[in-house]
Image (tube, helix red, strand yellow):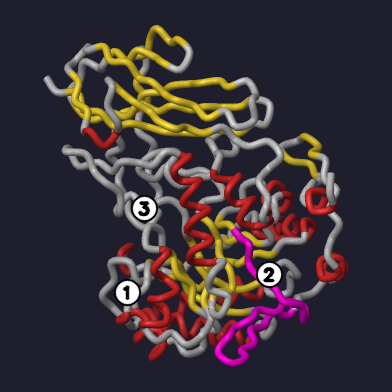
């Protein structure tokens, strides 16, 4: 094992089991672990090029949004996590991050117009500012804090631009109370109007952060075209968003396989994040965790039981330049009734149709294939708001043989999805895919 591989092994307790880790810390990390107070963070500009410094040393964000299994993130080259709010577990999370030598972009949960918050209500805005101050005072001196994320996608479905004055007031308050850390706000994509508002009304922010998915590769050019003259980070990025994806004839979004996503995590990172050394200070990939958003596999990098999905291999490559010694399985193709998800598959009630997956066994381990059928989700929210997972359909799969299974179409008319999971039990990594289908009477 060479030294670079050795750097990313770890010895930590995770989920009650000891994971072996031998991870020598950098001089900054060794110093940081001795620090009981804040570690100063700043941005310096030289000839139009920006660099973040933490504790006086250059710092580039190799981050992910979410706090699940931070030990794994640290062991594959990640150095930062992002949260969307503070809560009862925040101090514990900061302590864990500090122990691992990683930082936290702490989210401050600002009221959203689409949820009913009125930025013309001066009393409500003042009360919110007071609450933000309490949160800042509580955590500002922790050595794991990197910067403050003031609100998330406050611009999504909004009309009242006074929100930016409120963001600026929070930023000024933070700089008064906490001179050691940066302030930013996270936008739902970027355009000329938003940049104009931020420049006019949020001049106190240290940098801009943008959430973007399918259009990530356009971001470096757009940032410059719209005249943003400070640094920025990419605060969320990952697979193609459900709002950007192809749709079936019955108007549900078609999800990429995890193998397609893994390639996009790699290619989009190289093309749009790593390539912009002038203004981009790093990024937070989405989602270092699991959630239901259109499906239970669309955005999360983990399964519900905590098993990592193959996109994590791509993040290790992005952060270290090397693939894992043993690669996750993948999926080269997935068919239902001989058709792909793009074919808008209709079945009759009770009709038998064969589902077939073509695995990629990259590590030559023992591959296990599992199948599930779900109703199509009807609890459709926006902006990442909580969605309920649709009910599972039981008793409709039979004659499982090798990489095939027989689907007996449900009797009830309506939209469904059939999911497949390809797992290598030795390395505990999973590939996923699903196909929507419609039962019509």
Q: Which residue is drawn at 64% across and 87% down?
A: 44
Q: Where is residue 186 in the image (x, y as percent from the top left)?
A: 46, 70
**Is 171 covered by the magenta stretch?**
no
* Residue sitting at the far left: 441
Residue 169 vertical position relative to residue 408 in the rendered view, above or below = below
Element type at mark 3: loop
Instruction: Sort mark 3 into few (<14), some (14-19) or many (20+) by Cα contacts within 10 Å.
Output: some
Instruction: Sort mark 1 into few (<14), some (14-19) or many (20+) by Cα contacts within 10 Å.
Output: some
Element type at mark 1: loop
Classify residue 202 by image quadrant.
bottom left
Q: How far apart are marks 1 and 2 (CA)?
A: 30 Å
Nearer-N-terminus badge (3/2): 2
Q: Viewer-nearest of labels 1 and 3? A: 3
Tell me the quadrant of the picture where the C terminus can be found: top left
Classify residue 126 by image quadrant.
bottom left
Label of residue 145 in the image: 2
Q: Residue at x 47, y 40 (%)?
A: 258
Residue 4 vertical position relative to residue 169 in the rendered view, above or below = above
Q: How far apart are marks 3 and 2 (CA)?
A: 29 Å
Magenta region, residue range: 40-63
Q: In this view, does 209 lie to the left or right of 78?
A: left
Element type at mark 2: strand
Q: Where is residue 147 in the image (x, y as percent from the top left)?
A: 62, 73
**Is 49 covered by the magenta stretch?**
yes
Q: Name the residue under label 3.
A: 241
Nearer-N-terminus badge (1/2): 1
Q: Mark 1 points at which residue?
A: 118
Residues at marks 1 and 3 touching, judged by CB atoms closer than 8 Å: no
Q: Is residue 219 left or right of residue 77?
A: left
Q: Can residue 122 be seen in this view?
A: no
């Amino acid at each position: 094992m060479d030294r670079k591989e050795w750097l990313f092994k770890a010895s930590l307790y995770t989920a009650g089991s000891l994971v072996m880790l031998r991870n020598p810390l950098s001089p900054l990390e060794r110093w940081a672990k001795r620090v009981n107070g804040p570690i100063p963070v700043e941005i310096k500009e030289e000839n139009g090029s920006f660099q973040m410094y933490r504790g006086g040393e250059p710092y580039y964000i190799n981050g992910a949004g979410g706090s699940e299994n931070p030990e794994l993130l640290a062991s594959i080259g990640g150095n930062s996590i992002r949260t969307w709010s503070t809560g009862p577990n925040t101090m514990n999370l900061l302590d864990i991050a500090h122990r691992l030598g990683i930082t936290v972009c702490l989210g401050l949960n600002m009221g959203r117009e689409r949820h009913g918050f009125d930025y013309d209500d001066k009393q409500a805005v003042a009360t919110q500012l007071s609450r933000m101050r309490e949160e800042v005072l509580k955590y500002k001196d922790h050595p794991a804090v990197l910067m403050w994320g003031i609100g998330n996608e406050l611009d999504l479905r909004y009309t009242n631009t006074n929100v930016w004055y409120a963001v600026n007031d929070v930023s000024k308050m933070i700089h008064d109370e906490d001179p050691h850390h940066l302030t930013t706000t996270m936008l739902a994509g970027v355009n000329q109007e938003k940049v104009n508002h931020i420049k006019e009304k949020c001049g106190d922010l240290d940098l801009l952060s943008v959430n973007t998915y399918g259009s990530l590769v356009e971001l470096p050019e757009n940032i410059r075209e719209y005249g943003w003259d400070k640094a920025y980070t990419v605060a969320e990025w990952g697979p193609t968003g459900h709002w950007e994806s192809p749709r079936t004839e019955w108007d549900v979004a078609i999800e990429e396989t995890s193998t397609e996503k893994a390639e996009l995590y790699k290619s989009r990172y190289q093309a749009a994040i790593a390539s912009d050394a002038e203004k981009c200070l790093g990024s937070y990939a989405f989602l270092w965790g699991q959630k239901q958003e259109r499906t239970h596999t669309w955005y999360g990098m983990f399964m519900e039981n905590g098993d990592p999905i193959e996109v994590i291999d791509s993040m290790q490559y992005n952060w270290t330049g090397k693939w894992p010694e043993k690669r996750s399985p993948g999926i080269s193709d997935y068919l239902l009734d001989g058709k792909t998800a793009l074919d808008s598959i209709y079945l009759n009630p009770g009709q038998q149709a064969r589902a077939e997956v073509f695995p990629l066994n990259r590590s030559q381990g023992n591959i296990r294939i599992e199948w599930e059928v779900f109703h199509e989700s009807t609890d459709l929210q926006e902006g990442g708001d909580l969605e309920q997972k649709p009910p599972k359909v039981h008793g409709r799969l039979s004659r499982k043989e090798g990489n095939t299974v027989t689907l007996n179409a449900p009797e009830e008319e309506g939209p469904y999805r059939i999911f497949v999971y390809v797992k290598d039990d030795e390395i505990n990594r999973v590939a996923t895919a699903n196909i929507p289908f419609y039962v019509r009477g």
